[in-house]
Image: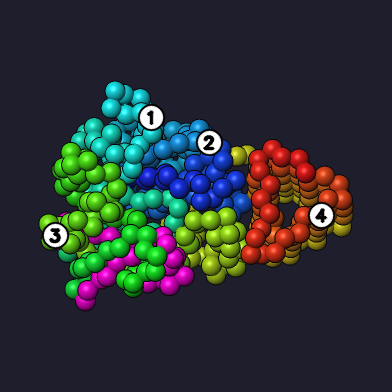
C-alpha cells in the first residue's frame, strides 16, 4: 500500500531528557553511535513506501534541520513530494510555539490539504521501535475504522503518572482510553502513533480547534471513543519498544542495544535505518587498546580500554584511559588516565587526564555539550 503520507511530531517533552535536550529537540537526540531518534520513524516510513513526510518541529530545531537537510539520505528530495519541515512561525494568531499537537496540525492544514494521499500515519519521536507503517495502514483500511491506534502489550512501557493506555476488545475496537493516570488501569500502552484518512483528519482538527481544544489524545481521541462519534480500532506492535522519557531510560536503551539480538529487532535487514552521512576514516585501534562488547563508530581512535560502551563518530580514548558502561557522543575526548563508568558525554565533551567519573547505573552522570571536566 503506497497511498499514505506521514507526519512526524518532534515533541514537546524535551524537559524529560534534561541535559540531552538543552540545545536540541527530542527528535535530534543521538543514539547508537551514528543515528538520531528521528532516523527511526523516518526510515520506517520510507521503508513502508511513504514518499511524502512532514516533520512538525516545536523548539530547539536547528540541529534537527541540519541533520535532515533536503532529505537526500532518505531519498526524500524529489520535486513532487519528499521531506517537508514544518516549524512554528509567527502570525497574529500564533506566538511562535504550538499550544499542542492539535494546534500544530491546525497551523499546517495547508500542507495536509495540498497533499494527495488518502491516508496519514502520524507518530511521535520519544518512543523508539521498528515500525511497519504499511501493514498498519492496510489493517486500517480493511477494518473500516475512522482511526487506528498503534499499541503494545509490553508491561515495561507502563509508567505511574504518565502515559496513554487503552482497552482493546476482541474485535479490535478501542473501548477506553486514559491519559497520564496516577496508576494505569487499562492493559495496553498506546504508542502515540495512529493512522487516519487525510480528509477526516482535516475535518476533525478544524472542529476540535474551533471548540478551543489543543490536546489531540485527551480532547479529540478520548471524546471520540467515549461518545461513540469515532470508530477507533487498535493495531498491535509485537516488537520491542523503548519509551525515552528520562535520561535513565535513554541510558538503559543504549545499553540494551549492545546486545546483537536486540539490535536486530530495531535494525531489520529488510528495512534499513538511514541517517545523515559523515565521511570519516575507519576507526583506529592502536597498541594497547582493549575493546569488549562495544559499538564503535567510524573515525574513532582507541588507545585505552573500552568495555560495554558506545562511541560515536570521531571519539578519541587516549592511552591509559578506561571507559566502561558509558556513552560518548561525537568528537568526545577522554584523556590518558581518566576513568569513566555509567557516564553520558554529549558532543565534543572533554575529560581531562586522571579524572574519575564513577556513578551507579541507576543514576548515570551526564556531561553536557562542549564541557571540559
Q: Secondary structure at mark 4?
A: strand
Q: Are marks 3 and 4 in contact (CB under 8 Å)?
A: no
Label 3, label 2: how many angstroms apart (C-alpha)? 42 Å
Q: Position of residue 101 (x, y in %)?
A: 32, 44
Label 3, label 1: how many angstroms apart (C-alpha)? 33 Å
Q: Which residue is mark 1?
A: 96
Q: Secondary structure at mark 2?
A: helix
Q: Which residues are magenta?
A: 144-170
Q: Nearer the viewer, residue 184 or 132?
A: 184
Q: Badge 4, how many Cα within 10 Å: few under 14, some, many 20+? A: some
Q: Which residue is mark 4?
A: 356
Q: Is residue 370 above or below residue 271?
A: above
Q: Residue at x 50, y 32 (%)?
A: 62
Specify whether residue 130 is in view. Answer: no
In the displayed structure, does residue 292 sit left or right of residue 84?
Answer: right
The disc, 3 or 2, on the residue closer to the chain's N-terminal end is 2
Tell me where residue 357 sits by quadrant.
bottom right
The disc, 3 or 1, on the residue closer to the chain's N-terminal end is 1
The disc, 4 or 1, on the residue closer to the chain's N-terminal end is 1
Q: Nearer the viewer, residue 245 or 236?
A: 245
Label 4, label 1: how many angstroms apart (C-alpha)? 43 Å
Q: Which residue is mark 2?
A: 63
The disc, 2 or 4, on the residue closer to the chain's N-terminal end is 2
Q: Are marks 2 and 1 in contact (CB under 8 Å)?
A: no
Amino acid at each position: 500500500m503506497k497511498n499514505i503520507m506521514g507526519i512526524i511530531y518532534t515533541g514537546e517533552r524535551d524537559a524529560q531528557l534534561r541535559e540531552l535536550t538543552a540545545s536540541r529537540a527530542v527528535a535530534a537526540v543521538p543514539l547508537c553511535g551514528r543515528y538520531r531518534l528521528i532516523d527511526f520513524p523516518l526510515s520506517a516510513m520510507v521503508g513502508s513506501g511513504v514518499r511524502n513526510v512532514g516533520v512538525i518541529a516545536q523548539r530547539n530545531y536547528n540541529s534537527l534541520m541540519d541533520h535532515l537537510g533536503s532529505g537526500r539520505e532518505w531519498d526524500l528530495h524529489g520535486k513532487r513530494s519528499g521531506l517537508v519541515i514544518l516549524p512554528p512561525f509567527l502570525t497574529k494568531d500564533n506566538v511562535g510555539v504550538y499550544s499542542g499537537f492539535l494546534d500544530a496540525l491546525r497551523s499546517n492544514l495547508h500542507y495536509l490539504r495540498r497533499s494527495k494521499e488518502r491516508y496519514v500515519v502520524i507518530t511521535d519521536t520519544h518512543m523508539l521501535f521498528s515500525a511497519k507503517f504499511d501493514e498498519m495502514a492496510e489493517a486500517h483500511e480493511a477494518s473500516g475504522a475512522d482511526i487506528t491506534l498503534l499499541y503494545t502489550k509490553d508491561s515495561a512501557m507502563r509508567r505511574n503518572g504518565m502515559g496513554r493506555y487503552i482497552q482493546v476488545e476482541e474485535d479490535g475496537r478501542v473501548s477506553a482510553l486514559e491519559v497520564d493516570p496516577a496508576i494505569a488501569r487499562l492493559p495496553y500502552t498506546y504508542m502515540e502513533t495512529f493512522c487516519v484518512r487525510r480528509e477526516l483528519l482535516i475535518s476533525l482538527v478544524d472542529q476540535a480547534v474551533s471548540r478551543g481544544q489543543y490536546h489531540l489524545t485527551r480532547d479529540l481521541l478520548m471524546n471520540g471513543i467515549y461518545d461513540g462519534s469515532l470508530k477507533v480500532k487498535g493495531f498491535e506492535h509485537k516488537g520491542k519498544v523503548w519509551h525515552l522519557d528520562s535520561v535513565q531510560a535513554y541510558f538503559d536503551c543504549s545499553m540494551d542495544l549492545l546486545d546483537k539480538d536486540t539490535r536486530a529487532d530495531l535494525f531489520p535487514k529488510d528495512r534499513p535505518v538511514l541517517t545523515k552521512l559523515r565521511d570519516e576514516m575507519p576507526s583506529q585501534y592502536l597498541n594497547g587498546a582493549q575493546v569488549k562488547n562495544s559499538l564503535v563508530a567510524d573515525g574513532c581512535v582507541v588507545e585505552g580500554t573500552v568495555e560495554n560502551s558506545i562511541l560515536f563518530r570521531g571519539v578519541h580514548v587516549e592511552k591509559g584511559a578506561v571507559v566502561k558502561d558509558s556513552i560518548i557522543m561525537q568528537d568526545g575526548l577522554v584523556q590518558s588516565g581518566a576513568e569513566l563508568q555509567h557516564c553520558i558525554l554529549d558532543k565534543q565533551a572533554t575529560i581531562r587526564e586522571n579524572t574519575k567519573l564513577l556513578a551507579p547505573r541507576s543514576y548515570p552522570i551526564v556531561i553536557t555539550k562542549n564541557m571540559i571536566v
